[in-house]
């Protein structure tokens, strides 16, 4: 029997690639998604379809980060930043964008830790990336290492001497490399949704950071972009 | 204006004492409670009454840890362990009791971190205790220190150089010392609920670990125990 691994899974490009990598690395994944008050709830529907097609167990957890506010992703009074071109995105990591959701990855990993402990998994996958850097503090390698150290003190598994591992296979890959790896593994990127602010027709907006970084990734990988863009999307 | 602090607040003896300590230490507390699928939901009602009487802002967050199972506190198919006497409780910390909820304090602290970040608080109080040790891995000092280190890497506050502090004023106190401190600060312990398995009449069961440790605390402190026990409680 293959060991279980919990895979944080939004139905986006990165986490869908992560799910395929967990399988090819020998795990039987438990995909874990969150309905957390995000404006792009379509991603959960994408996640459910992808997990079902892959024959992977899929847990969807409801949490209400919108109640706390503080981010354009959960607070409709804050606009999702839009740009005409990827060059307008600050990729230095020196500013934290309005789409940063306070403590989101800490909360997501904490739930993954609970699932891992209950289900006997020692491995948690998260599709964070330090190359196409979004400026989120909780995507940095030092955060992941620190969370892993904490997780091994927090849990029965840690106390009993097993080692919980937070696996980040995308950490040092460019978006183009992630896409190339996913294509190798048979990921159907047309089924994934990356957009932070999808239009009413469910299509991607084309102008948010996530759309622009994704489009550049396909361009750099030399692979046709199967993203379904909104027919009504405007610069916003 | 007094600085804000987030206080994890169950409405039990420890966290209610913690709330009073946060106030006397100069903070304007935001009390944070969780409706997480626990069988002892009465504690949330106690928490709301106590916070209201203290004039403290109170957030109640819904999360579903019961969906994951794995603990007597959220899974009704697992019995809450009962004892005739406190001497029957293993206090060595060598076993983890059935009431341990996997990753619960990690999840609670993660939400507290989100609230702290959104509301501009640098301080989080949690009423963990290492003396009357319950055997929970996520009540140990090394866990708290590790969480604090992680929190400072996870968040905007950390990146921008402020220091998030996880404050544990009860860590090195016995239950009797906690009660004595609370009495000094005017805590009304009759309003708090510690029981893991309250009866239908809302009274404490008298025989779970939480009831027995609490009763011993009042006995050792030489203070009359105002706990309202169930009139129907049985050894179970």
Image: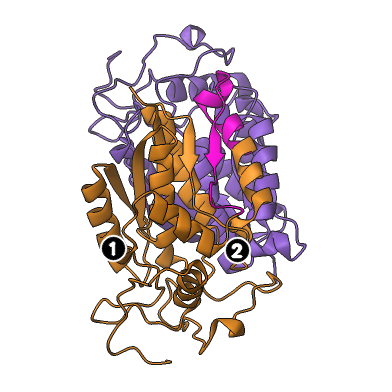
Chain colours: A purple, B orange
Q: Nearer the viewer, residue B214 or A178?
A: B214
Residue A129 lies, in percent from the top left, at 62, 30
Q: Residues within 10 Å of mark 1 (few under 14, many from 20)?
A: some
Tell me the subunit letter for badge 2. Answer: A
Residue B137 lies, in percent from the top left, at 63, 61
Q: Is residue A79 left or right of residue B98?
A: left
Mark linked to residue B191: 1
Membership of A192 in magenta stretch: no
The answer to whether any part of residue B95 appears in the image is: yes
Determine the CA span between mark 2 and mark 1: 34 Å
Q: Nearer the viewer, mark 2 or mark 1?
A: 1
Q: Which residue is mark 2?
A: A117
Q: Residues within 10 Å of mark 2 (few under 14, many from 20)?
A: many
Q: Is residue B158 left or right of residue A11?
A: right
Q: Residue at x 60, y 63 (%)?
A: A117
Tell me the subunit letter for badge 1. Answer: B
Q: Is residue B72 above or below residue B64?
A: below
Q: Residue at x 71, y 72 (%)?
A: B94
Q: Is residue A38 above or below residue B108?
A: above
Q: Nearer the viewer, residue A33 or A192?
A: A33
Q: Quadrant of residue B87?
A: bottom right
Which residues are drawn in magenta? B150-172
Residue A52 lies, in percent from the top left, at 45, 59
Q: Residue at x 62, y 26 (%)?
A: A176
Secondary structure of residue under mark 2: helix
């Amino acid at each position: 029997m293959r060991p279980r691994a919990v895979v944080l899974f939004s139905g986006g490009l990165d986490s869908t690639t992560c799910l395929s990598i967990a399988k090819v690395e020998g795990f039987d994944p438990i995909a874990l998604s969150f309905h957390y008050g995000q404006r792009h709830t379509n991603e959960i529907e994408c996640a459910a379809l992808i997990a079902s097609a892959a024959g992977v167990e899929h847990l969807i957890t409801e949490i209400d980060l919108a109640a706390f506010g503080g981010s354009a992703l959960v607070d409709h009074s804050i606009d999702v930043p839009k740009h005409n071109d990827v060059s307008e995105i600050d990729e230095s990591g020196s500013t934290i964008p309005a789409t940063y959701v306070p403590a989101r990855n800490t909360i997501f990993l904490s739930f993954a830790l609970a699932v891992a402990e209950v289900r006997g998994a020692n491995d948690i996958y998260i599709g964070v990336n330090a190359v196409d850097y979004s400026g989120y503090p909780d995507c940095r390698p030092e955060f992941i290492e620190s969370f892993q150290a904490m997780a091994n003190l927090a849990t029965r598994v840690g106390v009993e001497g097993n080692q919980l591992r937070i696996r980040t296979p995308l950490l040092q890959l460019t978006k183009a490399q992630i896409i190339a790896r996913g294509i190798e593994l048979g990921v159907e990127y047309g089924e994934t949704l990356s957009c932070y602010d999808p239009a009413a027709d469910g299509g991607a907006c084309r102008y948010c950071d996530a759309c622009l970084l994704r489009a550049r990734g396909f361009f750099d990988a030399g692979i046709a972009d199967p993203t379904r863009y909104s027919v009504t999307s405007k610069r916003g």
